[in-house]
Amino acid sequence: MCRRYHKVSLGIPVLWVFVHVLRFQSVGENVRWAHDTANPWRLPPSTLPAQPTLGAGGTAEIMAEQYGRLDQWSKTAAIDVAKAREMAAMLEHRGRNADEVAARNAYLTLLGMRPGERVLEVGCGTGVVLRDLARRVGPNGSALGLDPSPALLAIARELADKAGLGQSIELREGDARVLPFGAAEFDAALAVTTLAHIPDGRRAIRELVRVVRPGGRVGIFERDPDSYIVAHPDRALTRRIVAARSDHGSADGWLARALPRLMAAAGLRDVQVRAFTSIETDPAGFYSSLADRSADTAIGAGVISEEERRQWLEALATE
């Protein structure tokens, strides 16, 4: 529940799913199942679900047609420097939010980062999380950030060097769905508000598991945009705007809800989920600005009119 403090209160729940990986499983702080005497932590091949077939009319194609067509974060590979700077400002603004800082500290602690480890973050953007990872693994460890955008990676390098973390951070261009790494290269891997913006991003879950060594950890931190909570007098209009943002502002806006099931479908057991909710009371804060962007998405999707947008934002400012 969000409580109102000032003029507006906005919140959005997020889920953190994490794991200790032992061969081919991903989610569960305490993995307790065994089958194979040679490798007691691996499920027998007959019990491992096959990858979904993505042929004509498959899940990936259906989702691509219906969702995420206004998701700017799914199209970062080709953005220019000016657009990258604009998007970087949003990422860094969000990263400074007090609730974000607290949640980041909590989920990185749950992931159990230790000095000297080699860790991977997919979809690192400007490196907000990556820099905290680098601080935790220390000078003898390394934090590798992968992102499809050369422009965002260039900014991530600038910020890493400015923070004095350049020696601990590696950056690489690539696709989370087909990671350019061999098996078991990392002690831990994570994706933070990334997979929901990747068309068919669910494929990346198996890739995260593949590149982490036996005994390592994998974590996924993802938002649920359809649960965006807004203190507004017009319930019906608010619901239309929130739903439009969820359906059209993310390639897979309901991914967070499916993560436990997807982890199990990847052959994993003992899924552990931790929920966080950011509450925004500052009209100039990141999540307050998300209200404007949600209304713009609703217009782009043809869900509301310009007049409805104006009325909704005016009422929000006085609520």
Image: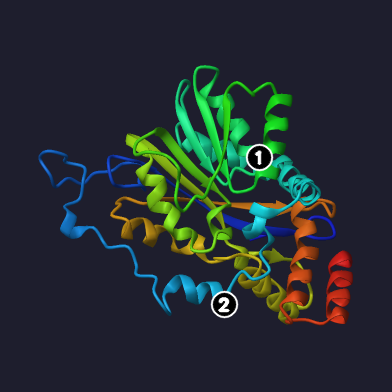
Q: Looking at this rendering, what residue extends furthest in the top direction?
A: 140
* Residue named by callout 2: 66
Q: Quadrant of the N terminus?
A: bottom right
- Give SS at disc 2: helix
Q: Is residue 3 visible?
A: no
Q: Earlier in the sequence, mark 1 or mark 2?
A: 2
Classify 253 as above or below 220. Answer: below
Judge left or right: residue 302 versus residue 226: right
Judge left or right: residue 259 versus residue 252: left
Amino acid at the residue labelled 1:
Leu
Residue plotted at (37% across, 62% down): 261
x then y, percent, for residue 83 = 78, 52
In front here: 315 or 171?
171
x then y, percent, for residue 222 = 54, 54
Q: Looking at this rendering, what residue extends furthest in the left direction?
A: 37
Residues packed near mark 1 inside 10 Å, few (<14), some (14 to 19) or many (20 plus): many
Amino acid at the residue labelled 2:
Gln
Q: How much space separates mark 1 and mark 2, taking CA atoms?
A: 30 Å
Judge left or right: residue 85 versus residue 136: right
Would you say the residues marked 1 and 2 are in contact, meaning their CB atoms lie under 8 Å apart?
no
Residue plotted at (21% across, 46% down): 42
In front here: 299 or 269?
299
Classify 264 as above or below 99. Answer: below
x then y, percent, for residue 57 = 43, 80
Number of on-image labels: 2
Q: Tell me where residue 5 sits by quadrant.
A: bottom right
x then y, percent, for residue 96 = 73, 40
* Residue named by callout 1: 153
Judge left or right: residue 4 versus residue 40: right
